[in-house]
Amino acid sequence: MTLFSLVHRNLRRNRLRTGLTLLAVALPLIIFVLATTVVNIALRIAASAKEHLRLAVHHKVSLINPLPEAHRRRIEELDPEHTRIKAVCGMRWFGGRVPNDQFNFPSLAGDPDTWPIAYPEHRLTSEELAAWQSERRAAVVGTTTADRFGWKVGQKITLKSVIPPYLTVELKIVKITTAGDTRMVSFRRDYLDEMLRAVGAPAGYANIFWVKCHRAEDLGPLQRQIDELFRNSPDQTKTEDEEAFLASFLKMQGDLPNLMAAVAAFVVLVVILVAANTMSMSFRERVGEVAVFKALGFSRRAVLLLILAESVTIALWGGILGSLPLYLLLKLFPDIGFGPISRISVPPRVVGVALGMSVVIGLLAGLVPAARAYQLRVVDALRRVA
Amino acid sequence: MALPLTYNLRNLYVRRRSVGLTVAALALIVAAFAGLLGFAGGIRRVFDVTGSPTKIVVLKLGSTSETGSAVGLDDLNKLTAIDLLARDERGRPLLSPEVMVQASLRRRGSGDEASANVAVRGVDDMAFAVHDEIKLIEGRRFNPAEYEVIVGRAASQRFEGLTVGSEIPIGYAGDKLFTVVGVFSANGGVRESEIWGYRSTILDVQKRTMVSSVICRLARPEDMKAAVDLIQGPTIQLTAKSERAYYQELNESSKWILRLAMLLVVVMGLAACGAVAITMHALVAGRTREIAMLKAIGFSGGSVLAAFLIEACILSLAAGAIGCLISLLFDGMSRDMLNNSFTTVAFRVRLTPAIWGLSMLTAVVIGLLGAFQPAWRAGRLRVIDVLREG
């Protein structure tokens, strides 16, 4: 009889208890998987934010206060040979909504010439790039928003702003993108400014200037240089790398990743307690059996292994039940959202983490009974009357 | 006849290891339950107490929040003419034009660079008549002749530099230093997360001319619909919402946190049922002969069932009590979140006796649900079968 089949026989001995333990391990692990997914998404966004080599320059007081577009030229003059700065792209918050719809999505107008350079992750093809450059009303739309309204490339859409002067713009979709925030609608700032001027509103402002750099080591010095440049102007700036910018933005939204990390840790603790309970029970019932095993010549290490294997097996099954159905469910129905994240899918890596965590849980839960089996004296155990 | 309580206590003691682990798991779940309720309650309370049945928030047509709204003088004049408004002793309509801007402030004790967007509201004396929930609890009101502000209690506790006597930078360029001269309470509502200064001064340092909103107080709450219809109608053409409706919509973004909390609680509660069931099964299984004996000497199946349910109750009450003690760690924790107006609302995790009561009740319900099947089995044991196994 192999170790594997012995363990499974043992687990089948008290099916009810094994079933209940699986339930009590698998359910919290579902939460663990969801929580780690959120943390994983946040980490991935932060990591990709680093790769993008972008600095966010915004008003020192608040993102809401716009900066004059002349800031762009002055930032570019810091590096006339373009050895450090690839492009500077001014973005203005538009605050658009689809008329008569409550769906909230970010909409920003970017400098037409530098936007494609600052955001290469959207991978505009040469035709799409040509369309963006020639069509003043061009817009690039994220998949979440496009799917929600059933928008297609080439379609004309209308957005109405909820901030003064409450403009309505008509845009033409040139690309539907899966990169970045997939709710985002990006269009051209020259078109927005033209609309603003038409109603006599102040034009020529941006809420953020994204400074796309060539090399990571230039980010820090540039950040200080830019803030120094505007220190004595009425429009002082605060420059952050994209990671810090997103982190403080996330923190303002309620700090979901940290909350989720705490939940995940908590869940693991509860599961360990439940699994430990089951293991110590099944060990108590089988003290005599363990003694017989030892008497038959099984080594101390063998009985230790037997108990640990049983504990790990049950935790691992719990982990499989807790992660795989959820993984498959979200694969089949990808439109399930979760708070501010419009759609989630469990990355395979998170399933791996959950299974690895199950093994750790199993080991910890089986530790005490396994140690007791290891130390068990055959004589004592056999003498005891159950 | 019922079995004595000491019988239950001793039984639990005999199985103390298993019982202890179950109590610990259940206690953690109860603590999380209480903590999440306190968190959710803290958020909800802030927005609930803000909604007065007689106040109307008036914004520019098409705006969804004060931050993105600009109301002009001509609009203001039209509002003044509405005769549904309450009036002060000098006969002036209770209507407060207010400007809403933001200041970047660090959170207390956070130590990191990330700052929060705190609302700065510019008002005049009339605001204190319209917002009658505002009470000065420390210091004095701001003097219009100076760069002075008063701050809400929650803001003062959550953000750095908001104590009486300290100075904070406000204004478009963030370069004007305002002295904090007072702290106010607002019945625990949203405005406690704000900073208030004199309207003209705030408009000036912010390089603005138009106010963000006009808050009106009605004489009678029954007139709410008529007033909202009038303001949204063809003559005035502004957006009007009852204060309650306005803040409920602003708080839309926090709803998912409440939903998430509920999801966590339900799933963990189910898992806890499983954990209790495991232990109770073991308690029953280890004592089948004893149960048979009890029945043989005359205890009924019902009293055996009751005995096990009582044991589960004791176990869950212990877990509930420990869980509530652990949850004390979360009590008073200061948190904040951004609302749809792009300003930060501070709130405290508040654990109330009601929450603790509910947590204890939940613990007992979980315990009884988990224990019922094993207890039922114990009550149905047939003496003859058990004793024959022997």
Image (cartoon, rainbow, N blue to C red):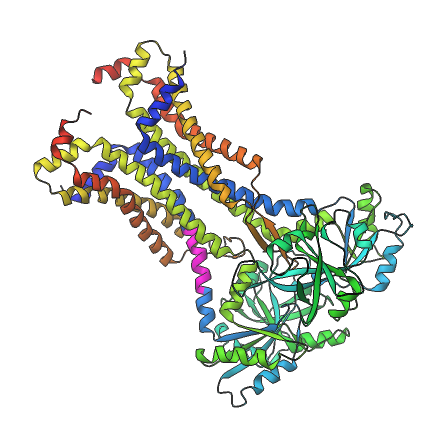
Residue A159, percent from left and from top? 66, 65
Residue B318, percent from left and from top? 43, 31
Front one among A333 and A28: A28
Q: Which residues are magenta?
A: A33-44
Q: From the viewer's perspective, tell me whether residue A189 is left or right of residue B273.
A: right
Residue found at x 37% / y 17%: B304
Residue found at x 22% / y 41%: A370
Q: Is residue A345 visible?
A: no
Outermost residue toward the top? Answer: B298
Q: Is residue B380 visible?
A: yes
Residue A82, percent from left and from top? 51, 87
Outermost residue toward the bottom? Answer: A81
Residue found at x 35% / y 26%: B12
- Classify the position of the N terminus of chain A by image quarter: top left
Residue found at x 45% / y 60%: A41
Residue A129, percent from left and from top? 54, 79
